[in-house]
Amino acid sequence: MLLSGTQRPTRSTIDLDNLAFNLGSVRQFIGGDLRYLAVVKADAYGHGAVECSRRLAAEGIDWFGVALPEEGYLLRQAGITEPILVLGSFWPGQENSVIELGLTPVIFSAEHASLLNAAARSSGVVANYHVKIDTGMGRIGVRFDEAHDLAGKLADFGNIRLDGLMTHFAVADDLGQNQFTHEQIKRFDYAAEAFRAKGFSPTYTDLANSPGAIAHPESRRNLVRLGGVLYGLGGDVLPREIPLPMLRPVMSLSTAIAHLKHVPAGETLGYGRTFRTERDSIIASIPVGYADGYPRSLSNAGRVIVNGLFAPIAGRVSMDWTILDVTDIPGVKNGDEVILIGRAENCAILAEEIAKHAGTISYEITCCIDARVDRRFTGVE
Ligand SMILES: *Cc1c(COP(=O)(O)O)cnc(C)c1O
């Protein structure tokens, strides 16, 4: 196709070798005899779920985690055969697909269990599911002090099998709140005991997300659910006070200068005229904006790398374009590469830096890179 979006130079590049490196690094750090689940929800945090999953499968990952059954469908279509945990359960009407695709849904109510059980029975199978316990996150999950009641109801279903018990941490990254994390672990064990008392013996117990797995060894049990660390996004979701595994960023984002001009001192640039040239300036337009997922909050605040040097963003980031002051970049010319996330020889911009300007975490930055941005992969096996 002539208009494929690959002509515009705005591009995310996903380094699958770094993805594999991060998995290896975390495995070495955690060690032990336990299973690893790679969380590839939201298109692998914006990194491309199919390609990342294929590489992680080649690296021997045990499980995948997605938020929605339809995300699991895409993985099955791509030939992924590992077990897939659907972290966000399913919506009524999706239970037959869940069974057909062999997805393992998270369940936290008898109503969902009943739907799954009926779908499994009509397919003539026994389907695995995991139960999510709410131990203090307050989001989805049966409350730990109501686990006993749910266990009683689940015991009635003949076509579904409890394969795992799980919970999710609220502050595993904040060592100052370790007491709360320890309380969550205690509540989880209390709920797990209620299930055992009803005769359940789940294969998996898993509590830990990335910060849990790194900072709270006692939470690792026999499965850890890793998202952020696999994508090298440790900088703003892991505690800084403890030793950490070495991680490499997986996503970089780049474009090229589309238009370069001389602008005399004293002129204003962009929507709202928020930038004024203090000197005779060289101004570059780059074809990236907030519709691409490049946050508008970088206006007059963010920076990029041009020819190995930092250049500041001038004025507002608009929907499709961003303006740079490249006056201090020697020899700058049209078509020069511009690194928005990534590294040059002597400087780097991490998703964490952009997140800080945007008042968020790096996960949101990579997740929000829009589908219209061309995506390339390196290290495809
Ligand atoms: C997203 C998610 C994870 C992964 O969290 P990271 O901080 O990215 O490791 C783990 N468990 C559940 C239930 C999740 O929703």
Image: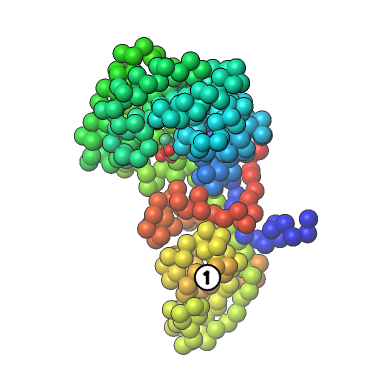
Q: Is residue 98 visible?
A: yes
Can you give x and y, in whole percent of width and height, for residue 222 in the image? Answer: 41, 21
64 lies left or right of 131: right
7 lies left or right of 342: right
Mark 1 nearby-residue class (10 Å; few <14, some 14–19, many ≥20): some
70 or 327: which is nearer to us? 70
| Residue 94 figure quarter | top right
Residue shown at 59% from the left, 21% from the top: 122
| Residue 190 figure quarter | top left
Residue shown at 55% from the left, 78% from the top: 282
Colour scheme of the rendered structure: rainbow
Residue at the extreme right of the image, as rendered: 1
79 lies left or right of 66: right
Can you give x and y, in whole percent of width and height, for residue 138 in the image? Answer: 31, 39
Q: In this view, does 235 lie above or below 316?
A: above
347 or 63: which is nearer to us? 63
Provide the residue designation for mark 1: 318
Q: Can residue 214 be seen in this view?
A: no
Quadrant that contains the N terminus: bottom right
Q: In this view, does 200 lie above or below 303?
A: above
Indicate the amino acid at tag 1. Ser
Q: How many marks can you see? A: 1
Can you give x and y, in whole percent of width and height, for residue 4 in the image? Answer: 72, 57
Q: In this view, does 226 lie above or below 315?
A: above
| Residue 140 figure quarter | top left
